[in-house]
């Protein structure tokens, strides 16, 4: 009897931790929400003169898929990122701080449009910020 009770307590705690771990992912609407945010971000990026040139002749479908995967992983969702690392992906694209910041603004606008809470946006942006070191083009 005590063993069954202990097992029930462990199971309950495990479920609570699982929900706590993916809370940020859920605030973004899980995979359907991330897909919509990525679609809206891409629309913003393509209409933004500061970022649009970086996406000329880019494989749109692949970029969106990999971005959803990457954001899902960063938000501790049940995904696996199958793309290349950021350094290799952005190599030779001459991305500077202004272009990186413009993309972040475009992402923020998409998150706002999709009702992502401000504190959740900040948590994601804090995870994305260090990527600049791998994305920037060093001459």
Image: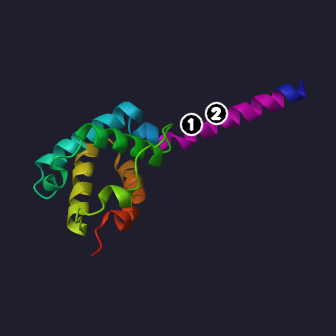
Which residue is at 13% across, 59% downward?
A: 50
Which residue corresponds to the image point at 34% horizontal and 64% vertical from the top-left? 132
Q: Magenta region: which residues?
A: 5-24
SS majority, magenta? helix
> Is 20 inside the magenta-drawn segment?
yes
Q: Nearer the viewer, residue 60 or 12?
A: 60
Identify which residue, 135 or 111, lies in the foreground. 135
Q: Is residue 19 magenta?
A: yes
Could you tell me which quadrant the C terminus lies in? bottom left
Secondary structure at badge 1 equals helix
- Name the residue beneath numbered marker 2: 15
User: Is the image coloured rainbow, by chain, by secondary structure, or in one colour?
Assistant: rainbow
Q: Which numbered circle lies on residue 104? A: none
Q: Position of residue 124 (x, y in %)?
A: 40, 52
| Mark-to-mark CA distance, 2 and 1 | 6 Å
Give the residue at x 30% y 73%.
Answer: 138
Cβ–Cβ below 8 Å for labels 2 and 1?
Answer: yes
On residue 19, which mark appears? 1
Quadrant assignment, res 37: top left
- SS class, disc 2: helix
């Amino acid at each position: 009897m005590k063993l069954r009770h202990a097992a029930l307590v462990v199971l309950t705690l495990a479920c609570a931790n699982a929900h706590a771990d993916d809370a940020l992912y859920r605030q973004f609407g899980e995979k359907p929400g991330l897909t919509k945010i990525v679609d809206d971000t891409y629309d913003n990026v393509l209409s933004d003169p500061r970022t649009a040139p970086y996406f000329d002749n880019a494989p749109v479908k692949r970029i969106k898929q990999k971005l959803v995967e990457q954001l899902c992983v960063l938000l501790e969702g049940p995904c696996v990122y199958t793309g290349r690392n950021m350094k290799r992906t952005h190599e030779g694209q001459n991305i500077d701080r202004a272009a990186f910041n413009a993309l972040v603004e475009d992402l923020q606008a998409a998150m706002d449009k999709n009702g992502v809470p401000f504190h959740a946006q900040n948590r994601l942006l804090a995870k994305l910020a260090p990527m600049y070191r791998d994305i920037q083009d060093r001459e």
